[in-house]
């Protein structure tokens, strides 16, 4: 089901010759809402549609009309996305990617917004179908309280780290160390990761770096080398990352998005994409560990 959605999206993109139809975060939504045994986020369908659609619209508007260079635009988009996330009443971190992605890649087409909204509604519909057939249970949703002092502090730390990494990302061409799926992973890890988590740091790094390598490898081998349609590369990469997730039982949604993002980036960026993603997630994971250590120290005092 997930692979079919991704393949259909890429096929439409190729038929219309419009790469901005490819919405990598749909892989994360599918993994967290359809594949995982339990819903990955505290969210309901209505809020998911509103947050992803609203985030995509906001990101498109920032890309089109916010003044200044790319560095300032991406950092502004990340800050605004985090603020909306904190007040969303949910834990739906992928909404951050919906805002930041169009700014980072310079999207100027309405097709990005249409694709994000349509695909999100499709995922929601498939979830309801699975619930109706008994393959997924209906899970209760409760609105989370507004952010407290700790969450604001965490947001400021994330923003500072992103501001540092955005410098080489924008000015040195290593754009994908600040790839939106990694910023989503950073948000989730910095808020929820603990030393007791089955997501050990090395596993997180291996999973996300591996996802980037799977996506880049599939595109390089099947499309760039053999000349096959990008749809086949996306489908093959999706199958492989899903096999990894089901095998490890680590249903980390950003792994799907970082895999699919490899289908959207320029061909010249494919070769170093896994290295850039790996470098980025190492920094984000290390920072998340330090943040958890600091929380424990404060709680023990």
Image (cartoon, rainbow, N blue to C red):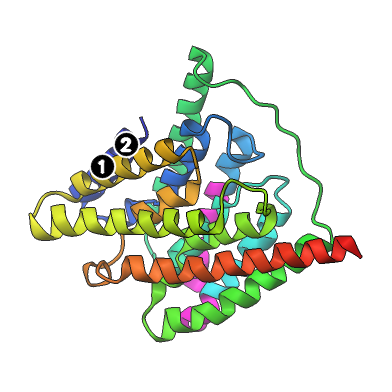
269 above or below 88? Answer: below
Give, as a single range, the part of the protein colored magenta. 52-73
Left or right: 73, with 230 as reference point: right
Q: Say left or right for 86 vs 64.
A: right
Please give the label number shown on residue 3.
2
The percent coordinates of residue 177 (x first, y second) are 44, 71
CA–CA distance in space, label 1 to label 2 = 6 Å
Quarter placement of the C terminus: bottom right
Name which quarter of the figure residue 242 lies in: top left
Residue at 33% x, 57% y is: 20
In the current view of this chain or complex, which residue is farthest to the top?
A: 133
Question: Are circles 1 and 2 on residues that touch, CB within 8 Å?
Answer: yes
Packing grade of label 1 (10 A; few <14, some 14-19, many >=20) is many
Would you say the magenta stretch is mainly helix, strand or loop?
Answer: helix
- Per the rendering, the mark at residue 109 is none
Give the residue at mark 1.
235
In the image shown, does 231 or 168 lie closer to the viewer?
168
């Amino acid at each position: 089901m997930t692979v079919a959605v991704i393949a259909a999206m890429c096929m439409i993109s190729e038929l219309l010759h419009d790469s901005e139809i490819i919405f990598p975060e749909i892989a994360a939504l599918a993994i967290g809402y359809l594949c995982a045994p339990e819903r990955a986020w505290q969210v309901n369908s209505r809020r998911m549609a509103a947050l992803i659609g609203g985030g995509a619209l906001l990101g498109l508007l920032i890309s089109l009309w916010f003044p200044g260079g790319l560095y300032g635009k991406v950092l502004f988009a990340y800050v605004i996305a985090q603020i909306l996330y904190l007040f969303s009443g949910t834990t739906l971190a992928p909404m951050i990617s919906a805002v930041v992605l169009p700014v980072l890649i310079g999207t100027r087409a309405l097709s990005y917004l249409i694709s994000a909204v349509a695909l999100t509604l499709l995922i929601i519909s498939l979830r309801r179908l699975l619930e109706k057939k008994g393959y997924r249970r209906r899970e209760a949703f409760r609105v989370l309280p507004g952010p407290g002092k700790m969450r604001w502090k965490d947001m400021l730390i994330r923003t500072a780290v992103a501001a540092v990494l955005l410098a080489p990302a924008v000015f040195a061409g290593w754009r994908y160390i600040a790839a939106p799926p990694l910023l989503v992973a950073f948000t989730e890890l910095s808020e929820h990761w603990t030393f007791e988590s089955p997501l050990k740091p090395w596993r997180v790094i291996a999973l996300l770096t591996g996802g980037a390598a799977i996506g880049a490898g599939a595109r390089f081998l099947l499309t760039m080398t053999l000349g096959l349609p990008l749809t086949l590369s996306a489908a093959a990469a999706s199958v492989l990352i899903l096999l990894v997730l089901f095998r490890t039982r680590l249903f980390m949604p950003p792994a799907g998005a970082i895999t699919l993002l490899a289908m959207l980036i320029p061909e010249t960026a494919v070769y170093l994409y896994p290295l850039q993603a790996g470098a980025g997630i190492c920094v984000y994971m290390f920072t998340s560990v330090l943040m958890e250590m600091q929380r424990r120290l404060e709680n023990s005092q």
